[in-house]
């Protein structure tokens, strides 16, 4: 038995996770993997603590990364700021966190990609441009995270504004923990922004906003990323492809017939069972938002795999007893919907809608 356990540990990178401290335990485990140089081994997630119920058959990893990504970017965690307009995340300017922590986060994101999982991090396109060694320099490069700023910079480049009247100089100003910080973008005394240098101003402004003021944090993140996703591998992709590979396809809807085609059934259900026929009729009547909520309820992730699309989703409907007043539940680790044999379609729809609207979080629902 001892030999088998030792052999298991040798074969896999074991990530020990606490449900009560999900993010802290994940980052601690990844840090240990960096130090021991074991991150490259196949991943196995193992939970510890009381009331343990998780076994890693692959679905646990999907659920883990679906939840840990948003926690990494939570403003309360302090490492990233969320734009109010787009809800996308970028490195917090003036962050007081240690640089090493950003390296661990970079490895955590790469660990998901390396093991074929998407991770729910709301990073913008420019993150993936920079991982590919390309500096954002144009308003279009920042439009998906800062659309209002991008529009303002585009207007500045147009012929509709007299730039000299704006009183701009080659300085960059940002807010850091309620303090205003101004840094010169050039070593010489900050010149005025005029018609002849406005394009240089826009380029340098975007470079300071995206990289210069957060350089230690991004560089550490990239070092962590490169431990599992070296440049020679990363550069096989375009920024859009790398973004989709990491974060999944941010779909607005999916093909219900295709999901129906790949769905499996258990404990008495089959494609021709009346309850199952009602179920698919209900799902087809759902709005796009409802369908994505259902997908997240069963699989823990509202996105679909990049390679196979909805066909690559594990979706199993299992009979969970006779008609009752219990809501449907799910084993998100296994992509399994536990559906009681409701007595009619109307009751099923009410119960399914209630379940998907009020369930969120990590673990067995």
Image (spheres, rainbow, N blue to C red):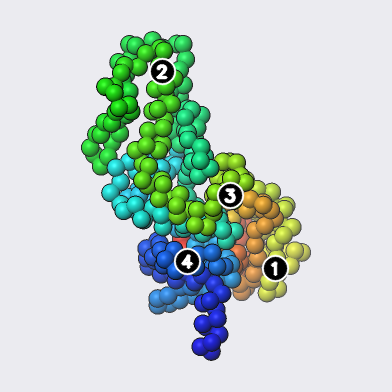
Describe the element under mark 4 as helix, strand or loop: loop
Tag 2 or tag 1, which sits nearer the N-term?
2
CA–CA distance in space, label 3 to label 4: 19 Å
- Between residue 98 and residue 119, name the one nearer to us: 98
Tag 1 or tag 3, which sits nearer the N-term?
3
Q: Are marks 2 and 4 in contact (CB under 8 Å)?
A: no
For the question of whether residue 88 can be seen, the reply is: yes
CA–CA distance in space, label 2 to label 4: 48 Å
Local packing at callout 3 (Cα closer than 10 Å; few below 14, some 14-19, many 20+) is few
Q: Is residue 104 above or below residue 48?
A: above
Q: Which residue is mark 2?
A: 198
CA–CA distance in space, label 1 to label 2: 63 Å
Q: Position of residue 282 (x, y in %)?
A: 65, 54
Residue at the spot x=55%, y=81% of the render? Answer: 7
From the image, state whether disc 3 or disc 1 is nearer to you. 3
Residue at the spot x=55%, y=45% of the render? Answer: 243
Q: In the drawing, does residue 240 fall left or right of residue 361?
A: right
Tag 4 or tag 3, which sits nearer the N-term?
4
Q: Is residue 284 above or below residue 48?
A: above
From the image, state whether disc 3 or disc 2 is nearer to you. 3
Q: Position of residue 26 (x, y in %)?
A: 42, 64
- Between residue 31 and residue 300, name the one nearer to us: 31
Residue 265 has which mark?
A: 1
Tag 1 or tag 4, which sits nearer the N-term?
4
Q: In the drawing, does residue 19 fall left or right of residue 308?
A: left
**Residue 57's quadrant in the figure?**
bottom right
Local packing at callout 4 (Cα closer than 10 Å; few below 14, some 14-19, many 20+) is few
Q: Position of residue 257 (x, y in %)?
A: 73, 52
Residue at the spot x=41%, y=36% of the render? Answer: 210
Q: Which residue is mark 4?
A: 37
From the image, state whether disc 1 or disc 2 is nearer to you. 2
């Amino acid at each position: 038995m001892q030999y088998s356990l030792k052999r298991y540990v040798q074969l896999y990178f074991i990530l020990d996770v606490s449900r009560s401290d999900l993010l802290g335990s994940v980052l601690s485990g990844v840090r240990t993997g960096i130090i021991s140089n074991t991150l490259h081994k196949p991943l196995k997630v193992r939970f510890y603590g009381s009331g343990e119920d998780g076994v890693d058959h692959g679905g646990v990893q999907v659920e883990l990364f679906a939840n840990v990504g948003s926690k990494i970017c939570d403003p309360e965690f302090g490492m990233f700021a969320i734009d109010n307009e787009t809800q996308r995340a970028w490195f917090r300017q003036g962050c007081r966190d240690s640089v090493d922590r950003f390296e661990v986060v970079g490895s955590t994101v790469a660990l998901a990609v390396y093991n074929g999982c998407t991770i729910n991090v709301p990073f913008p396109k420019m993150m993936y441009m920079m991982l590919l060694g390309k500096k954002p320099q144009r308003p279009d490069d920042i439009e998906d995270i800062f659309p209002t700023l991008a529009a303002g910079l585009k207007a500045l480049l147009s012929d509709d504004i007299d730039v000299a009247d704006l009183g701009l100089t080659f300085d960059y100003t940002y807010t850091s923990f309620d303090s205003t910080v101004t840094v010169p973008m050039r070593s010489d005394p900050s010149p005025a922004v005029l018609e002849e240098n406005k394009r240089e101003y826009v380029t340098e402004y975007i470079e300071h906003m995206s990289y210069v003021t957060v350089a230690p944090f991004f560089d550490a993140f990239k070092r962590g990323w490169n431990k599992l996703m070296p440049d020679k591998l990363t550069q096989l992709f375009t920024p859009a492809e790398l973004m989709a590979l990491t974060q999944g396809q941010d779909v607005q809807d999916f093909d219900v017939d295709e999901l129906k085609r790949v769905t499996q059934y258990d404990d008495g259900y089959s494609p021709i069972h009346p309850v199952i026929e009602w179920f698919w009729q209900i799902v087809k009547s759902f709005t796009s938002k409802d369908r994505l909520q259902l997908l997240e309820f069963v699989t823990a992730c509202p996105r679909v795999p990049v390679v196979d699309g909805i066909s690559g989703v594990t979706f199993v409907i299992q009979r969970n007893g006779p008609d009752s007043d219990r809501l449907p539940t799910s084993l998100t680790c296994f992509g399994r919907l536990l559906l009681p044999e409701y007595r009619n379609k109307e009751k099923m729809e009410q119960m399914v809608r209630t379940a998907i609207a009020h369930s969120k979080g990590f673990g067995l629902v």
